[in-house]
Amino acid sequence: MILLLLLLPITSVSAYKDLFASPLEPEFFDIQIDRSNPQKLYKEFENFVIKYKKTYADETEKKLRFNNFVQTHNQIGKVSAKAKAAGSDTQFGINHFADLSTEEFKIRLSSIAPGNHSDVPIFNTTRKRSRSKRQLDNLPVTFDLRDKKIGARYVLNSIKNQEQCACCWAFAATAVAEFAHSLHKKKVVHLSDQEVCDCGHGSIPGCKGGDPTEGLKYIARAGQASEIEYPYEQNRSYAMDSCAASVYERELDPLVLTLQAIDPFNAEYQIMMSLVHYSAPVAVAFRVGESFRVLESGVLEMEDCYKTEEAEWHSLTIVGYGRTRTRKGRNVDYWIIKNSWATDWGEGGYARVARGINWCQIESRAITALIQ
């Protein structure tokens, strides 16, 4: 496919104008178009609208959404070319974010960098580090907590959707807590992400961003209601006074969750592997680049997360690890991550990112929790 800037044939420009009842601004054409088939992208856009059940207020919004869609399409082309040039097998594609502008997409990210929590016990003491090094030799090459069951039910709960609220940090913290609680109770439980988003934030409302460690510290201190009792509402946590924890019964009691952090000044991904293998998913925060938004499959190795002046952060949970071999015969170690962007993103809501290189700082601020 040949891509170019502007310089479209008059017939092609006219064809695009005919698609909309409202006029198009000149800036609309500052995008890349397939010269050989100017209608192709619009047909893809129509299929996208049907697939994701998109509705727009009027033709003006539809025009803007198509503009965003084309820009996303162009971005996919750019990152795909970079990945291919680097010898990576990563695939990128259209998902339910494709009609959002960059600013709209960033609403669900956090501008808050994860902090240093000196009050949280460090997992890798000298004794534990030595023990973990020995255990590492016995770890399987690939391990996936999605396979772990209690009876006939999988312990790891299904993919959730934070929608436009930037409370990824609360979802990551809750995923860790409910896994530990399920193992302790020997039954699968669903805890309230909304409670953590409402009550576990720091100096700003939960939907403006946060730190998964703060979320787990809140759960350890106050316990947590069930998801049924305190359900998720994406627009609730934009105010500081939204906490309603006192109204709901505790599914997870206070003061039973024990937090364990990985030393941020001596991050050891092998210890994170050991924790995951011994049934402790790990909550992490990392910087986000453009490639992460359009990730479809394969192991993401590209670190375009450092290109923006202002860091954008995201939190999620590491639930496994493994190793794959590229088409060119190169071994790539990876983490399996559980996201909170619904199942339309990545590999059914999960993804794989590079392991052992502190990809986008994902191994720098890691925390888990146990019930002993």
Image (cartoon, rainbow, N blue to C red):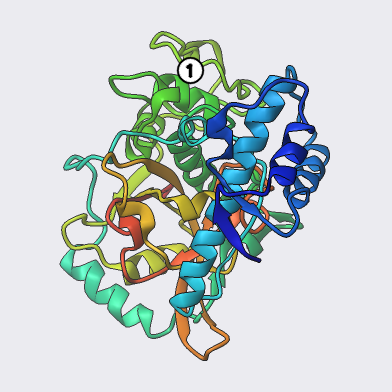
User: What residue lies at 65% left-to-right and 45% top-to-bottom?
Assistant: 188
Q: Which residue is mark 1?
A: 237
Amino acid, disc 1: Ser
Where 178 falls versus 364 (above or below)? above
**In terms of depth relative to the viewer, which is nearer, 327 or 316?**
327
Where 149 falls versus 287 (above or below)? below
Q: For numbered disc 1, what is the local secondary structure?
A: loop
- Residue 322 visible in image: no
**In terms of depth relative to the viewer, which is nearer, 64 or 228?**
64
Query: Number of callouts in the render?
Result: 1
x then y, percent, for residue 185? 58, 45
User: What residue lies at 27% left-to-right and 56% top-to-bottom?
Assistant: 364
Quadrant hosting residue 347? bottom right
**In terms of depth relative to the viewer, which is nearer, 215 or 49?**
49
x then y, percent, for residue 224? 50, 28
x then y, percent, for residue 221? 35, 29
271 on left or right of 147 = left
**In terms of depth relative to the viewer, which is nearer, 65 or 320?**
65
- How many residues crowd around disc 1 within 10 Å: few (fewer than 14), some, or many (20 or more)? many
324 on left or right of 313 = right
x then y, percent, for residue 136? 37, 79
- Residue 7 visible in image: yes
275 on left or right of 5 = left
Where 116 falls versus 3 (above or below)? above
User: What residue lies at 56% left-to-right and 31% top-to-bottom?
Assistant: 26
Quadrant hosting residue 241? top left
